[in-house]
Amino acid sequence: MYASGYIAQQVLNGTVLGSMYALLALGMTVIYGILRLINFAHGAVITIGAFCFYVLFVSLHLPFLAAIALVVIFGGITGILLDLVAYRKIRGGPEVALLITSLGFYIFIENLVKMLASPQPYAFRPPPFLSQVNQTAGGVTFLTIDIFILLVSVGIMVFFALFVKKTKVGIAMRAIAESGETARLVGIDINRVIGLAFVLASAIAAITGFMWGGKYGQISYAMGFMAGVKAFVAVVIGGIGSIPGAMVGGYVLGIAETFSVALLPPGYAEYRDGIVFAILILVLLLKPSGIMGERAKV
């Protein structure tokens, strides 16, 4: 039997990991909702955000908040460029063309970072106040950056939920997701709204890149690949096209992955990715539309 403190520790670890998956899944879902595009290039923005913070904070010694603000801005600019360069010209074409293009741009950005930085991983240290070790009365240990990740993630999710429901741009996004042609007929500037969706999704991915590096203490040119793939798994588990489902899928995946490693015998941790995909297969067998997805109408 496992002690309650050990279980509480794993719940915290899984929730922190799930928060980052949920943020990445949120960005992927927004793009999928309006373009029907599984944007694998989203994973590359994580890498860009992490390296951007490294350059600004470690190399140029900018204040922490200034570095974070610039990471978010640079992530948003990356989203605009992705939309303009990669997708706008082929929008409306076959969905598989968009998918292949997203994979191509992921590989291009990954190799660009590899060439400009280094094939070797970089040690990534957040500011000292985020590296402080804390312990609760029950013996649960956590870093201050864990609290930072939880608070920022919840803040972004609440902001995004209100943005989509209460603002004109958010309502326009929902209208385009329902029917792009109808949205165009009622006067919605589709290109502008899609561009803003890319800005939001990429800005969220960029700050997630900082959190990912700060949590695990290392960044590399390839860090966005598996994170992006698992975010997509979270999207499928939660229900493709469902924003609440993406968040739920992220937390389910994070907690399941953490517990699978914590409860298995030592030496089995390397199979965590296989366990993640086993969970995906199980969910698809039991509920093909995902936890919060709607059954397709016939």
Image: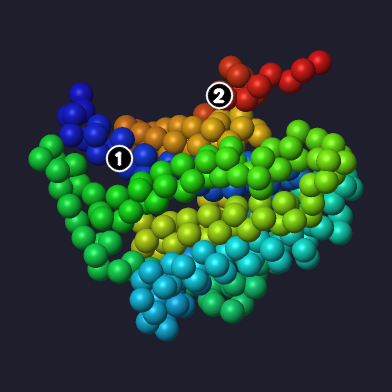
In the structure shown, which secondary structural element does the residue marked by tag 2 occupy? loop
Front position in the image: 217 or 242:
242
The quarter in which the C terminus is drawn is top right
Q: Where is residue 114 in the image (x, y as percent from the top left)?
A: 59, 72
* Residue 78 shows up from this direction: yes
Q: Quadrant of the N terminus?
A: top left
Residue at 50% x, 68% y is: 71
Residue under the image location 13 percent in, 37 percent down = 138
**Vertical order, 130 against 52 (above or below):** above
Residue 149, numbered label: none
The kind of secondary structure element at disc 1 is helix
Q: Is residue 266 above or below residue 218?
A: above
Which residue in the structure is indicated by mark 2? 291
Residue 89 relative to residue 204: left or right: right
Q: Where is residue 158 in the image (x, y as percent from the top left)?
A: 46, 42
> Residue 194: x and y, percent?
73, 52
> In the shown orientation, is residue 135 left or right of residue 29?
left
Residue at image mark 1: 12
**Left or right for 200, reference 23:** right
